[in-house]
């Protein structure tokens, strides 16, 4: 069983696109009978927390946030980093790119360029053999999405899975993976709150794959380069 916790900064986010709110929608959409069990979390009354007990009982944390990054306590971001190092998976969606937990995990600010739009987006697979892209259309077509574009202030990803192309001509590293300690981290760019992106069947397929990958439930060899780079320094000593 994979225990997924979906954290969305407020219940009213994306009400129009998802009815019950985004966390509740995603928790239901990602749950697969007994295999994946999801809990939706909305911080209450502006208290941007997540209980220690729930965090400890989470296999994969899904994080969507936009307006209240600053209100997330530093201690929570560090606790999330610690859990990932110990083996928890973390999936950051759309405007979670400058969130404190993402910054704590990748080590940079996560800033990017953006343009308010309802552009068409095509996500082209760079690594189609990756388990997160298994069975997912290539290119993955989205009729409407907010435009994010490079440069994106992230360290070179351990794996770049998809490049997003927008109809204004912009491009973006839309799906990226990092390995941190025993844990796995995935960032996925689509998911602006005014569009029903997470209702798209292909996106849902990708996110379900991402949950399994982040929970380390799929056979997958870490890319050698992540470790070879670290080992190669040893030859100098
Ligand atoms: Zn957005």
Image: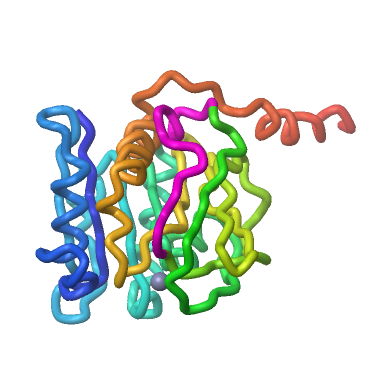
Residue 111, placed above or below residue 29: below
Residue 140 vs residue 109, the one in the foreground? 140
Residue 155 percent coordinates (x, y): 65, 55
Which residue sits furthest right? Answer: 236
Q: Is residue 97 left or right of residue 63?
A: right
Check residue 135 for magenta coloring: yes
Q: Quadrant of residue 202?
A: top left
Horizontal arrangement in the rendering, residue 56 relative to residue 84 (left or right): left
Examine the rendered structure and indicate whether residue 27 appears above or below residue 99.
Answer: above
Q: In this view, does 139 lie to the left or right of 228?
A: left
Q: Which of the 4 image quadrants contains residue 167?
A: bottom right
Q: Quadrant of ligand 1?
A: bottom left
Image point 34% across, 25% down: which residue? 217
Residue 154 highlighted magenta (yes or no): no
The percent position of residue 145, horizontal first and vertical second, equals 42, 65
- The relative height of residue 188 versus residue 131 in the rendered view (above or below) is below
> What residue sits 15% from the left and 80% below the top?
45
- At 22% from the left and 50% from the top, the residue drawn is 5
Image quadrant occupied by the C terminus: top right
Q: Position of residue 60 (x, y in %)?
A: 31, 43
Magenta stretch in the rendered image:
129-144
């Amino acid at each position: 069983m994979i225990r997924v916790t979906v954290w969305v900064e407020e219940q009213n986010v994306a009400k129009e696109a998802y009815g019950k709110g985004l966390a509740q929608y995603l928790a239901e959409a990602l749950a697969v009978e007994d295999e994946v069990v999801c809990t939706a979390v909305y911080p209450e009354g502006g208290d941007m927390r997540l209980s220690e007990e729930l965090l400890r009982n989470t296999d994969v944390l899904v994080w969507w946030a936009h307006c209240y990054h600053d209100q997330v306590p530093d201690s929570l971001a560090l606790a999330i980093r610690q859990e990932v190092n110990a083996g928890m998976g973390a999936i950051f969606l759309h405007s979670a790119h400058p969130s404190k937990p993402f910054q704590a995990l990748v080590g940079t600010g996560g800033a990017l360029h953006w343009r308010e739009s309802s552009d068409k987006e095509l996500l082209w697979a760079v690594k189609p053999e990756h388990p997160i892209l298994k069975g997912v259309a290539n290119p993955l077509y989205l009729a409407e999405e907010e435009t994010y574009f490079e440069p994106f202030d992230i360290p070179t990803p351990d794996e770049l899975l998809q490049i997003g192309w927008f109809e204004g001509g912009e491009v973006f590293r839309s799906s990226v993976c990092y390995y941190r300690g025993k844990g796995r981290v995935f960032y996925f760019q689509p998911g602006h709150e005014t569009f029903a992106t997470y209702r798209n069947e292909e996106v849902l397929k990708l996110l379900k794959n991402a949950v399994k990958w982040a929970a380390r439930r799929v056979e997958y060899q870490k890319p050698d380069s992540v470790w070879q780079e670290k080992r190669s320094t040893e030859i100098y000593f």
